Image (cartoon, rainbow, N blue to C red):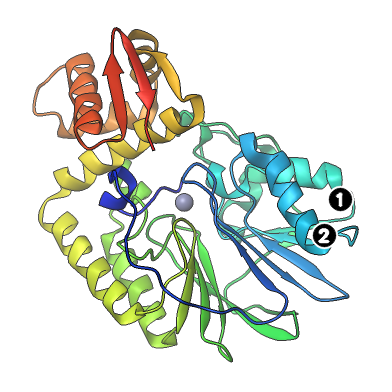
Amino acid sequence: MKLRCQNEFFRRTQLTHFHMYSLPTGVKFFQRGWLSSNNVLIHDSDIAVLVDTGYWTHAVQTHALIRSEIGEQNLTAIYNTHLHSDHCGGNAHLQTCYPDVLTLIPPGHALYVDSWDLQTLTYNPTGQHCPRFSKTGLLNAGDTFKAANLIWQVHSAPGHDPHSVVIFNSLHGILISADALWENGFGVVFPEIEGISAFDEVESTIQVIESLSPRLVLPGHGAPFTGVESAIARARSRLNQFRNSPDQHATYAAKVLLKFKLLEIQKSTLSDFLQWADDVTYLKLLHTNYSNGVSLEPWLHELCMSLEKSGACTIDDGFIHNLN
Ligand SMILES: [Zn+2]
């Protein structure tokens, strides 16, 4: 999951400034809503590589987007930056549409894909779904590949996810950043939910990105952006906030998990929604460690009220509705 730039995830209004950018021939950026990650299609007449495939509920749309760009040409390969459900949820469908497609994933979770370990792959503890897919190879840090007549380098980018990678083209200074860097922050630092320290990894990944000096970032969520130095400064500031106040990160993480489910289901009775949340391991962990003695249901209810206050949902007449 992947989820989203700090406050931007909950913000009622869109960013008002618009960044002009252009992409080299053969590089196509599909900006999706927050439920699905963005996708980058890198193609020429011989090869078509899709970086990340979105959430499973949007898999048909993901396929349509690919076809809108390459028509009847085959998709050669899927490269997943990491295995959160909103980044690889379309893998299974695309493997059906393109039986010969290669599927390369970062090595850290490879064994768990083979055994389809829902716990380690985080689909169970996040309360999310990802249709089972198979891998055909690995996307290792240090690998390079050529597509659209450009060389792309793979760099490891732990923090948000311990096994995430980012992909960089030095000629054009284009970074496919996944959830390691957004225009305003970075994705939830998932290991921290499980009590595994990972803020240092976020910082080291920011340093790696800084050393690459990207000119243009194609993030996992939100619009492409330039002004990368400012984005890095904002990410560092956010990271410092979280380091100084881990409960802020915990609240953010809990709200992201709730909002993600709302994006998926759009509407529910509040009682059914809270019952679902009651069962989500990561929410229970966050509650145990950060609720200051408030019992689970009132704590979840308070988070829903907070989402409503920020314009992310409405709660009315016993129902909760997604907004934005
Ligand atoms: Zn993610």
Tell me where residue 194 sits by quadrant: top left
- Relative placement, left or right, of 92 versus 301 is right
Precedes in sequence: disc 2 or disc 1? 2
> Residue drawn 82% across and 63% down?
70
- The residue that appears at 37% across and 54% down in the rendered structure is 187
Q: Nearer the viewer, residue 110 or 265?
A: 265
Which residue position holds label 1? 98
Q: Secondary structure at mark 1?
A: loop
- State the residue at coordinates (42%, 15%): 268
Q: Is the residue 272 above or below the residue 181 in the image?
A: above
Residue at disc 2, secondary structure: loop
Q: In the image shown, does 318 or 200 lie closer to the viewer?
A: 318
Give the mark count.
2
Query: Where on the picture, by quarter, is residue 116?
Result: top right
Q: Is residue 142 left or right of 134 when viewed as pictured?
A: left
Viewer-closest of 299 and 171 = 171
Name the residue type under label 2: Leu
- The dot on residue 75 is 2
Q: Quadrant of the C terminus?
A: top left
Distance in Å between CA atoms under marks 2 and 1:
6 Å
Q: Residue at x 60, y 78 (%)?
A: 23
Q: Is the C-beta of the residue carrying label 2 under 8 Å from the nearest atom of ligand 1?
A: no
Give left or right: position of 160 versus 200. right
Number of residues whose C-alpha sits closer than 10 Å to that of mark 1, classed few (under 14), some (14–19) or many (20 or more): some
* In the image, the residue with mark 1 has its CB under 8 Å from the nearest atom of ligand 1: no
Across and down, in percent, residue 215 comes to 45, 84
Relative height, residue 206 to residue 212 (above, below): above
| Quadrant housing residue 144 | bottom right
Question: Do the CB atoms of the residues marked 2 and 1 lie less than 8 Å apart?
Answer: yes
Q: Is residue 323 visible?
A: yes
Residue 225 at x, y percent in the picture: 42, 72
